[in-house]
Image (tube, rainbow, N blue to C red):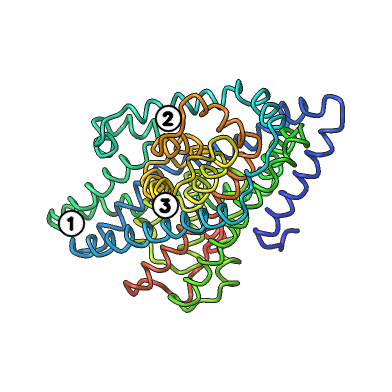
Amino acid sequence: MKNLALHWKILIGMVLGIVFGFIMNTVDGGKGFVSDWIKPFGTIFINLLKLIAVPLILASLIKGISDLKDISKIKKMGLRTITIYIGTTIIAIIIGLVIVNVVKPGAGMSADTIEKIKAKYETDLGVTDKLVKASAQKDAGPLQALIDIFPSNIFQSFVDASMLQIIFFAMFVGISLLLIPEKKAKPLMDFFDSLNEMVMKMVDLIMLFAPYAVFALLANVIIAFDDIEILLKLLAYSLCVIGGLLLMIGFYLILVSVYTKKSPLWFLKQISPAQLLAFSTSSSAATLPVTMERVEEHLGVDKEVSGFVLPVGATINMDGTSLYQAIAAVFIMQVIWPEGLTFSNQIVIVLTALLASIGSAAVPSAGMVMLVIVLESIGFPEELLPIGLALIFAVDRPLDMMRTTVNVTGDATVSMMVAKSLGKLRDNPEEKKWDDRFDKVK
């Protein structure tokens, strides 16, 4: 086991966690045991990843921008990054719409099944909470998303983990360092360089715990599934989402092969620990430190590129979430509002899902909050919204895990493409071990 690659250790932990969860589902008191004694270890792991996400974004982005030496390079990198992200998101939404319109998973669902799902999940606090959040976001002004980018108190932004505000601040600091004399900028640049190296080493140390953490996370997910009948009723919908997500993965692999001239299998092998963690945590923000470590040390992307592209991607690139929103919106309409399935409404879904993906937070189940906004944009009856969310609530968690995996894969793909276009993609990346310094001393 000691010499086993990290992705295999994580995969073994995931499989054992799933098996253990199913076993505990059949044992009296098993669910309580998992919740009280197993789940906390997964929570600790996620907390550790979130702990270093903010300093990592701050240090890597400031260092990456200040290392560019030329402000014009920032414009070039930024335009390419945003353009590719928007392009892949539009493709994801279109793939979702094509699949759900061809398969029609919501057609023919019985009224009894709908009522059963509604009774079980409509009163769930998760559904209610998402409706409240969506309502608050809808009531905000048209430029509120722009206002939210600019922090009034950066320390509060750190506390709230407001990624767009932190990214803006880091870019502001990096650009300012480029505009002052190099002699005066050097001490601060050296500080952020050292901070970046230290945080990346923390990633290595935290990842030693990853196989055990994903065991705890997956075991806790499995014990939540206690109504197999309803899950089977939603199988067609779930397969549509999974099929679309797999097509997106295939699309990324084509981009990697054609544009960066790298082997798709090699790419999957190098990025797999980040993918498996994204699947386990359902949070691209929590996975960000690991994604950066894999992209820099295993895919060969220079820090100045990964430090910009990946934090931005974790905030605005939600290909998997956008694809899910397209399928979920049409599925809900097929079940309870088929008269709304017009071509013009589906065009509106494309545009709204694109904008929603940019504003969607990189946290678990944020996609359901944005789904409400997508549905309301096409005039979906307000009184049917709770039923609509209840329809897909049962399978949201596993699908959330899968679409987060796609989001992270998309971030890594775009970072390679941008690096390749700027001549910043290395052929022989240098992998750092968690105990590099100890080995050198020894």
Quickly name the residue at label 1.
Answer: 178
Query: Disc 2 residue type?
Result: Ala
User: Mark 3 packing: few (<14 Cα in 10 Å), some, or many (20+)?
Assistant: many
Which residue is at 46% across, 42% downward? 362
Q: Earlier in the sequence, mark 1 or mark 3?
A: 1
Query: Disc 3 residue type?
Result: Asn
Q: Is residue 15 above or below residue 303?
A: above
User: Mark 2 packing: few (<14 Cα in 10 Å), some, or many (20+)?
Assistant: some
Quickly name the residue at label 2.
Answer: 134
Front: mark 2 or 3:
2
Which residue is at 49% across, 48% downward? 326
Whether residues under marks 1 and 3 lie with C-beta atoms below 8 angstroms apart, the answer is no
- Foreground: 217 or 213? 217
* Element type at mark 2: helix
Quickly name the residue at label 3.
Answer: 317
Q: Position of residue 119 (x, y in %)?
A: 67, 22
Query: Disc 1 residue type?
Result: Leu
Q: Position of residue 150 (x, y in %)?
A: 24, 37
* Element type at mark 3: loop
- Foreground: 369 or 9? 369
- Mark sitting on residue 250: none
Q: CA distance from mark 1 to mark 2?
A: 40 Å
User: Mark 1 packing: few (<14 Cα in 10 Å), some, or many (20+)?
Assistant: some
Say whether residue 110 is left or right of residue 167: right
Q: Position of residue 393 (x, y in %)?
A: 61, 34
Q: Position of residue 47 (x, y in %)?
A: 54, 36
